[in-house]
Each structure stands twice: as C-alpha cells, then as structure tokens.
Image (cartoon, rainbow, N blue to C red):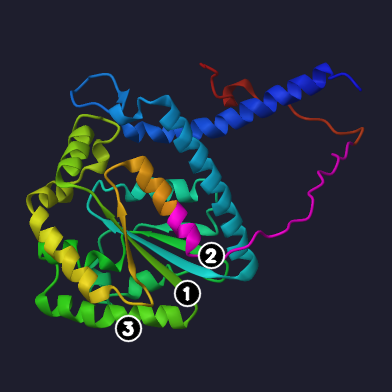
Amino acid sequence: MPTESKRDRELIRRVHRELIDDYDEELEMERDDWETLEPGAELRPLAHDADQSARNHYFKELFRLQGELVKMHDWIVETGHRMVIVFEGRDAAGKGGVIKRITQRLNPRVARVTALPAPSNREKTQWYFQRYVAHLPAAGEMVLFDRSWYNRAGVERVMGFCTDTEYEEFFRSVPEFEKMLARSGIQLIKYWFSIPDEEQEFRFRCRINDPLKQWKLSPMDLESRKRWELYTKAKEIMFDRTHIPEARWWVVQGADKKKARLNCISHLLTQVSYTEVAHETVVLPPRIRHPDYHREPVPPEMIVPEIY
C-alpha cells in the first residue's frame, strides 16, 4: 500500500481549509442570530443556541438541505421549469435570512432574488402588476420575491398608500393574475412568515443597538410597530381573499429563526417533484505551457497592501 506523500497531505489540508471556509460563510451569516441589547455591549449567541449539540444539528441539517436545493436547482435548469417563490411577513420576521440560505449555494443566474423598492411616479401610473411581471422567470429559472405584489394588501393598505378602489381592484385581479401564471406553467409558492409581537420587538431592539444592523430598521418599520393590529387584520383579509388552489399560502412559524429556515427549506423541497440530474465526469485539462511565455511583474504601486 503506497504511503501518503507530503504533497498529498498538503492537498488534504488545503481541501479541509476550503471546506472550513465554506462553513465560515454560514457562520458569518449567523451573526444575525447574536444579540446585544445594550449599546457597546459584546455580541453573544442567543440563549437558545448555547447548546452546542443543537447548533451542530442545525448546521448538519442546513448543509444537507442545501445539497438537496442544488439537486432541485439542477433539475430546474435541465427541465426548463419555472418557479416563483413569494416571501411575505412582518418586518424582522426572518424572510431575508431564509432567502439567503436558499440561494447561498445556488447559481445566482438561475436563482434570482427580487426586492423591488417603492414604485416610481411613472410606475404608479402603470398596471399594478406590470413591474413585477418584468422579473418573472424564463425557462430554467427560479425567482424569489423578497416582498411582492402583496405590498398592496399589506403595507399600502395599512399606511394609506392606496385608495379603497385600488385595494378592492387588487383583490379582484390577483387571483386571476396568479391563475394566469399557473396556466402559463409557472409554479407559484407563497410563504408568510409569522412571529409574535414580543419577538418582533426584541429583534427591533437588537437592530437599534447594533451598528451593523441599524440599516435594516427603516422609519416604515417603526411605524409598523404602532399599527400591529391593523397589519394583523390586513393579513387575515389577504389570506381569506387570495388563498386559492393554484397558489395557496403556507405559514412558516418564525419565532425561532433556525427552525424557520430548516422548516421552510424542507417544505419547499417537497413542493417540487425533482430528480437528481446525472452529470458527466468533469476532467480538468492540463495547462498548456509555452517556452516563450513570460509573466510581467505587477508594479508595486498597484498591489493592495497586505495588512493582514
């Protein structure tokens, strides 16, 4: 049996470092799950994350589910499937965290995230769905809407940004719009992320006291806190009038961010009848070397200082 060479051992160490770097990418994102309630206080993991075995289980399941997402992603490309996933919910409900974990290992040209800003003056004069239609998927694509046309049923209604007539027209139109998407072959999945009142308050306070999170807290978010009950009523009306067989709503319990991520991804995978796509073995071709090849040195003033 041949002995392991020094070169082999170094290669194995490099592979391990690369894997750890991949895991660290997720750990860096996990910073959103650390808490600080006092300005200048040291960040620490949330209390329920103190159990290391629970954290290990979370990462193990997340990486497993992300592996399945890659298989689903390959199947979507191979078959030309078109899919739209709508993420709605209260501010700080965890929509963004789930979207990051879904797309983290996927090709961004295939799995696109759309988060539209407030409509421009011109867009306000268009057919309401027009600016969303421009982002719908072509064959072999999935589009994740971080908030969607349901803005009209939620924030626009509660904040008075639409008239009663526009509001009623939305509910007349949206079932037909979504049925039209289904008839055209686009699979539409709609998720609502639900969190308790006290959990949203806690997350808002964390954002207020964390300089790296303060950008997440907008004046609209603060106003929404005062109108919690109005948002609840708006959500209930939205469910009642837009929960249709062609595009039903699914509610994700979001009080625990990690469980919400795993539950949502796991459920998403059950909504697509994907199969693993066989790939040809990739063979890395040898580099072609020419005796007259010469690499010019980079001028020192162009080099980024290596301070780390």
**Which numbered disc, 3 or 2, marks the residue that appears first in the sequence?**
2
The residue that disc 3 covers is 176
**Which numbered disc, 3 or 1, marks the residue that appears first in the sequence?**
3
Q: Residue at x 87, y 40 (%)?
A: 288
From the viewer's perspective, is 34 left or right of 290? left
Classify mark 1: residues with Cα within 10 Å, few (<14), some (14-19) or many (20+).
many
- On whether residue 285 falls in the magenta region, the answer is yes
SS at badge 2: strand
Mark 1 against mark 2, which lies toward the viewer? 1
Residue 195 drawn above or below residue 72: above
* Residue 60 in sight in this render: yes
Please provide percent x and percent y for residue 261.
Answer: 39, 47
**Which numbered disc, 1 or 2, marks the residue that appears first in the sequence?**
2
Residue 51 drawn above or below residue 114: above
| Image quadrant in which the N terminus is located | top right
> Marks 3 and 2, Cα distance to the nearest angstrom?
23 Å
From the viewer's perspective, is 127 left or right of 218? right
Q: Residue at x 30, y 32 (%)?
A: 212
* Residue 46 in sight in this render: no
Find the magenta span and give its range: 266-289
Q: Nearer the viewer, residue 286 or 167?
A: 167
Please provide percent x and percent y for residue 281.
Answer: 79, 51
The residue that disc 1 covers is 186
Q: Residue at x 48, y 67 (%)?
A: 83
User: Which amino acid type is shown beneath numbered disc 1?
Assistant: Ile
The residue that disc 2 covers is 141
Please provide percent x and percent y for residue 101.
Answer: 45, 46
From the viewer's perspective, is 110 left or right of 96? right
Quarter of the image for residue 216 reads top left
Q: Check contact, mark 3 vs mark 1: CB within 8 A.
A: no
